[in-house]
Every structure is written in C-alpha cells, then in structure tokens.
Image: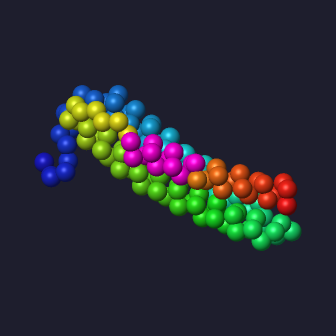
C-alpha cells in the first residue's frame, strides 16, 4: 500500500460515517457559494447608481470580504474533511473548531459591513 493511503477494509467498516462526512463537506461548499453570491450582491447594489462614495466603498469592501471569506471557508472545510476522514478511520473524534470559528468571525464582520451599507442605501 502506498504511503498516505488507508486500508480499504478499514474504510468499509465506517461507510456511514464517511458518507456523512462527505455530505457535511458538500454543505460547507454550498455555504461558500452562498457567501460568494452575497458578496456579488453587495458589490452590485451600488453599481451604476447615485449613492454616495462611502456606499460604493462599503459595497466593494463587503464584496471583496465575502469572496475572501468564501475562499477561506472552502480551504478550512477541505482541511476539516480530510482530518475527519483520517479521524474516522482511526476511531477518534475531534470537534470542528476551525471552520466554525472562521465562519463566526467572518460573518460578524460581514454583517456589520452590510448593515453599514444598508444604512447608506436607506438613509443616504
């Protein structure tokens, strides 16, 4: 067997756990796509409009921040998926702190930016 590969008989014993791990990974990918879409929406709100310069700046920051967050979350989710795969085969459980804490931090910052942007759009 090549280094870095696991014994197929070990993986076959934990098929349900591996399938659940893959579903969780796909859910994180859907979250990344939604966050990236939110960034495009935020950036597009003030495109070709008469809103002030500050609204444009916050829209661009929110858009770039969303895309950066989506990429960071994708990398964290991939890392967590690979770690969980190894942990399942070793019979170990560790909570997913990286992706969850990353999501919390970025979403707090992103929602703050979006609230400020909404303030500019609604109240000038």
Left or right: residue 94 compared with residue 63: left
Where is residue 44? Give x, y as percent: 74, 62
Give above or below for 105 relative to 47.
above
Asked if one can make out residue 33 in the rendered structure from this viewpoint, the answer is: no
Residue shown at 58% from the left, 48% from the top: 108
Q: Is residue 41 left or right of residue 36?
A: right
Query: Which residues, given as a range, are shown in magenta?
Result: 97-108
Please name the residue shown 64% across and 62% down the image.
Answer: 63
Question: Residue 85's image quarter?
Answer: top left
Q: Position of residue 25 (x, y in %)?
A: 43, 42
Q: Nearer the viewer, residue 86 or 108?
A: 108
Tell me if 85 is positioned left or right of 55 in this view.
left
Q: Classify 52 as above or below 18.
A: below
Q: Is residue 106 magenta?
A: yes
Quarter the C terminus occupies: bottom right
Q: Is residue 55 above or below residue 18?
A: below
At 77% from the left and 71% from the top, the residue drawn is 53
Q: Quadrant of residue 90?
A: top left
Badge count: 0
| Towards the viewer: 57 or 87 | 57
Q: Residue drawn 41% across and 51% down?
A: 76
Q: How is the image coloured?
A: rainbow
x, y (%) of residue 100?
Answer: 45, 42
Q: Which sits in the foreground, 51 or 9?
A: 51
């Amino acid at each position: 067997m090549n280094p870095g590969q696991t014994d197929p008989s070990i993986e076959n014993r934990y098929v349900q756990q591996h399938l659940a791990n893959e579903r969780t990974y796909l859910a994180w990918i859907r979250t990344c796509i939604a966050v990236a879409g939110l960034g495009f929406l935020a950036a597009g709100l003030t495109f070709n409009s008469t809103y002030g310069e500050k609204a444009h700046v916050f829209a661009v920051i929110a858009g770039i921040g969303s895309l950066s967050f989506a990429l960071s979350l994708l990398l964290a989710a991939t890392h967590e998926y690979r770690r969980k795969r190894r942990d399942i085969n070793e019979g170990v459980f560790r909570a997913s702190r990286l992706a969850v804490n990353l999501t919390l931090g970025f979403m707090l910052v992103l929602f703050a930016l979006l609230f400020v942007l909404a303030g500019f759009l609604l109240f000038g």
